[in-house]
Image (cartoon, grey):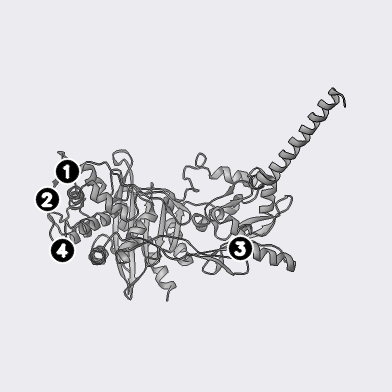
Amino acid sequence: MNKPLRRIAIFCGLLVLALLIRDNWIQYVQADELRTDKNNRRVIIERYSTPRGNIIVDGKAITGFKETTGSDFKYKRTYVNGPMWAPVTGYASQAFGATQLESIEDGILTGNDDRLFFRNTLDMITGKENKGGNVVTTLNAAAQKAAYDGLKARGGKGAVAAIEPSTGKILALASFPSYDPSSFAGNSTTTDTKAWTGLQKKNNPADPMLNRALREVYPPGSTFKVVTAAAALEHGLYTDADEKTDSPDPWTMTGTNTKLPNEGNIPCKNATLRVALQYSCNTVFGKVGADLGNEKMLETAKAFGFTEEQFTPVRATASIFSDDMNPSQTALSSIGQFNTAATPLQMAMVASAVANGGTLMKPYMVDELQTHNLDAIEKTDPEELGKPLSAENAQILQSMMETVVEKGTGTKARIPNATVGGKTGTAQHGVDNSENPYAWFISYAKVDDSAPVAVAVVVEDENAVRDDISGGGLAAPIAKSVMEAVINSKK
């Protein structure tokens, strides 16, 4: 072979070798990456080629599916009472992807999870159509309805979180205003895109797609005084609910000339912790925070779950208590103002730990994963998150919170034949408290010495008369209806 032909042959051989290397690289190295690439339309077509599994509450599906027409996506998602359940389910849209449980458990719901391989193989052998698995939640339908209806009746904005204290099971997770995930579940450039666009915050200032129960942090106001009372007991500043505190009224905040005011003519001078919680004395709990100091207050707040994101498995934003405050800032933070901020889920966790004898359980909303024929794949076991309170101090704090409901600011949460503990809060909002405050209520209910439910409610009502806004007036009735729904569902 002459020299030019040899060069051509070598060059062609190198081209063939390069092609083989590239082909094998794509098939064996990049195959999985390309298969799951979000821009690979075959992935999306496959995802919607079989009926999607369901999200289950109380044994009933709150989701469904239907066949589409004029699209290469065969099935699309439907929802039962979509706006009520949206903070739990999230959405699954052919055009806009998925969020929350729909996204986190997408493998189970589409049937593509490796744990469904055996079931899918049996269906293929027997000629059955592949179907997605089910996600069984911990939610209580009656409690969710009470929460959503209560917020909707109030108008404005708000959220509710309810927990079973002994296990951490989330019983209700409501947010208002909300949205219907069915309205943009398809991929129509007219109806679905129009619905989606109208829900975005830039086009809808009410921000209905914000999950306020998990993703919004609010100043908790006086509901945080439960944490401050826990810190006072746990760190030995006071040892009894009925021990008088060293709390002048008015009290000048440490290191300043500023007096911390109380709301109204209430008996706060040297009040006991019980009386201070009953009347919500700023001077008592502000001074407790300053006396304990930032480090001890932060330690207790962290023990209740502050400063850490929670995964339910849907992510909940971390609640805030700062670590670099001076005594006056610590005082304000200890009454739920300054830089303190919490999600409704976090404040439900506070009430839950008190109700559960001082033990905080990890909140979760997925009880079980199933195949489509209801065989269990995975079961969630309750998990202890910490012990922010000793059992003895939890009993003391329970008695204080029960006084709040019996004859304090939370009387609208009373439930016949149940013992209810609670704490109201009215948190400042806006620059120099220029906007309507947030109304809060956290509580638990006990029946026959067990506490089946703990609740946190926050209400934002821009249209209410400012003087009419209070945690006891706006939020406590909603909490009461949620607790009653849980109690009645267990009869």
Mark 2–mark 1 contact, CB under 8 Å? no
Residue 199 picture location, percent across and down: 54, 45
- The residue under the point 66% across, 49% down is 44
Residue 118 picture location, percent across and down: 65, 65
**Circle nearer the viewer, 4 or 3:** 3
Residue that numbered label 3 is attached to:
133
Alpha carbons under labels 2 and 1: distance apart: 11 Å
Q: Amino acid at mark 4?
A: Asp
Placement of 255 over or under 155, stated as above or below? above
Q: Who comes first in sequence, dot 2 or dot 1?
A: 2
Alpha carbons under labels 2 and 4: distance apart: 17 Å
Q: Who comes first in sequence, dot 1 or dot 3?
A: 3
Residue that numbered label 2 is attached to:
248
Q: Amino acid at mark 3?
A: Gly
Residue that numbered label 1 is attached to:
253
Q: Tag 3's secondary structure?
A: loop
Q: Tag 1's secondary structure?
A: loop
- The residue under the point 88% across, 27% down is 1
- Dot 1 crowding, Cα within 10 Å, few <14, some 14–19, many 20+: many
